[in-house]
Image (cartoon, helix red, strand yellow):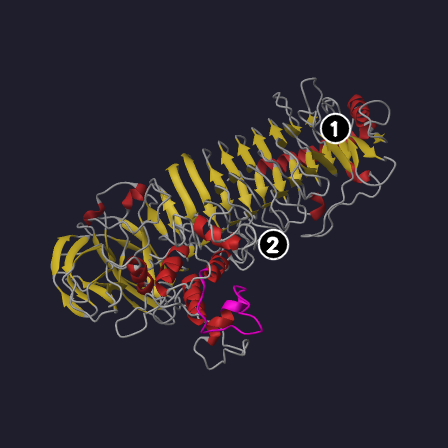
Amino acid sequence: MKIGTRFEIRSIAAAGALVAAATLSASTFTVTNTNDSGAGSLRQAILDANANPGLDTIAFNITGSGVHTITPANNLPNITDAVIIDGYTQTGALANTLAVGDNAVLLIELDATNLNPALVLNGPSGGDSSGSTIRGLVIDHIGADGIDIGGGFGNGSNDDVIRGNFLGTDPTGGTNSSAGTPLVCETSSGAIVGGSAPADRNVISSTNNAIFWNTCSDALIQGNYVGVNAAGNAALSAFNAITISQGSGNHVGGSAPGEGNVIGNFQFRGIVIANTDDTLVQGNLIGTDATGTVRLTNGVAGVSLGDGPANLIGGSTPGAGNVIAGAGVGIQMGGGSDGWQIQGNKIGTDVTGTLPIGNGIGICQTTGGTGTIGGRNPGEGNRIAFNGLQGINISDPGWTVVGNSMEGNHGIGIWLNSRCDLAGIPTPNDSGDGDSGPNGLQNFPIIQSVTNGSSTEIVGKLNSTPSTAFTLDFYADAACSNFPREFLQGRTYLGSAPVSTDGSGHVAFDVTLPVATEDGARISATATDPNGNTSEISQRIIFSIDMKSGPAAGGIGIDVFGTDFADGTTLTVGGVSAPVSFGNDHSLGTTSPALPPGTVNDIVVTTPDGTTGTLKNAWVADFLDVNNNNLFYPFVTTLVSNGITAGIGNGLYGVDLGTKRQQMAVFLLKAEHGLCYTPPPCLGTFPDVPCPSIFAPWIEALAGEGITTGCGGGNFCPDSLVTRRQMAVFLLKTEHGSSYIPPTCAGVFDDVPCPGAPAVDFIEQLAAEQITGGCSVAPPLYCPDGTSTRGQMAVFITKTFGLQ
């Protein structure tokens, strides 16, 4: 692979050239005033340096304290000879010396209001500015371009260094001040932007593109803050943060400490790689603050890949992986080139890989190209978790997807489908795997039995292309399922095994992997064909049903969907046998049996060869007080089938009863964390909630997450009913985090004055997220002090947490 080699060779040559240049007639020209021209001005210093061959220095010694602003009336001369422009020579200036929170003090401000660009390295007048350095400057009020490396005239400026500047921000590095592009490179090679030391860091912001690289090669863009303030803890503006278009061998970030960029906020894309090859994107924090734990963006895509072969996003070595979170798509790929590699990244998580930040979808491959997502060797697998839709979506053939760790995505782990905007269900297998589409719609294996222990024995079958060799890759999910009907995603990679189908396309396998798994661990697998096409992750053979509930007396027709069904398949609902009408290998028909009212029941199918599949909590026999004419019926059914509550007993849900605060604590935490969550043991935090209470651990956990501080006086008031006003705060803080601050109110509801009403911002945001429309449309009312009933609570929680 060519990545890095050209840059290393050029760097050695450039170092020799700079030494030679420095021996010619290097001089220092000092700026002593903020005038636009004449002796001591920046304009004159540039003219003098251009006229003096060799690597000169432009230093600053302007009288007085504070920021010194230079505001040229028109463009400054292009830089046509190597020069170091050093804003840190101004008395009192200070480079960054620490990491997050330690700001540089930059005292030389170049106001670019009248400039386009602000500074040009090399230009149409000839000469060569290669080997120049610009550091310690504030360049703000950029309307077009800030620093232009190469000048756009095809003769380039090579091996230039841009370090320690605030580009597009005010002199504090805390506020965006620009609508142009702060840093542009055109037809150049070997530039260095930033560096691994804090003093090298540029802070770059604009409502336009922040860094735009056009036909430039072998550059290092490292250690910068783009779309984040100088302290690294708050968002600044950027449309596209870093765009690499054409060229080759560019490095964005790196695996060594300090080399990764912090790309905090972007309106459109964080990093764009288009029509360029051998690009390395490593060690960056994309969409977060400098700690890698706080989301800063709501942009469209964290990384966007277009045409260009052999680009590597992440890598297997320590520190090479990127954190990509907070965007609509973590990594978006399209354009038709081959050899892309996506390895070692954390997509949807914080920097530890354990805490959720999320993207809309983890990885979306849309048009053409081939490549590898993950890998079987140490460090190659990506951590893809907590995203709103799929972990990975593949739209074309030729993608190998192996060795990744996926969990907590709201869609399935791998989906072979051209839609990246839907939460899909698995694609059914077909006999002989004769269909075509994304990754050839490769069939996935069926797991029939698992023996857990110090090693893991997996028995199953694969039906696919006849007489073909496949590689099976195996994964483990925790024994506990966060939500009853969630699909397996493959949290822990276990290893691989080769298999070959017979002339009929069948192979039975019995694989023992030397890897320990917990008792009851849910094992899944993928199959990859000789052309590198990987299947979706294997699932239970029953995917879904078309109805979730019906009268307890039974008699309701149900369509059952899944894969690898056969004539003679049997079915039970809640342990009660039900008739089966065989449709085809992925559809069955049945009729609900009589079951006790208010019960939640599993559906189990068994094929003639003994393969079983269970759809947990699939069928709800209607509650006595919530029939299908009730407004809350679908929401109650969804809530109880997800295990959040089981009703109040005796076949009743209690739809019109108020929701107690202690009940609310359980509902919220189960909906947020899933059914595997167990709160820490109680400590007696609230005097009115003694530790023997079954609700005490849940109440204390809710308080520990900062969702509530109680009802006043140190108490929680567990038996008090939750008001609709309180419900708005509880829901949004649980959904978005305890520090969440909703947008300022606009006056949506007549009975919730804006401003002034308690929790008015939360109430209006709840409506904006379409969780509620209030209690009346005409006039628009919310009824903030009304009791939140259990029926209303079912609506609120189902919509807030997207329960299916």
Tell me the quarter of the picture where residue 81 sits. Answer: top right
| Residue underneath mark 1 | 82
**Left or right, residue 284 beside residue 113:** left
Q: Kindly check if marks 2 and 1 are in contact, taking CB atoms under 8 A apart as contact.
A: no
**Left or right, residue 358 beside residue 644:** right
Residue farthest along the top direction in this orientation: 125
Highlighted magenta segment, given as a residue range: 702-724
Q: Nearer the viewer, mark 2 or mark 1?
A: 2
Q: Is residue 708 magenta?
A: yes
Q: Amino acid at mark 2?
A: Thr
Task: Give x and y (percent) for residue 601.
Answer: 24, 67
| Residue underneath mark 2 | 291
Secondary structure of the residue carrying tag 1 is loop
Label placed on residue 375: none
Task: Give x and y (percent) for residue 330.
Answer: 47, 46
Tell me if mark 2 has few (under 14), some (14-19) or many (20+) residues whose alpha carbon lies within 10 angstroms of its own: some
Q: Is residue 370 visible?
A: no
**Left or right, residue 45 beside residue 211:** right
- Which one is in front, 106 or 258? 106
Q: Is residue 398 visible?
A: yes
Task: Give x and y (percent) for residue 658.
Answer: 39, 67
Q: Is residue 670 magenta?
A: no
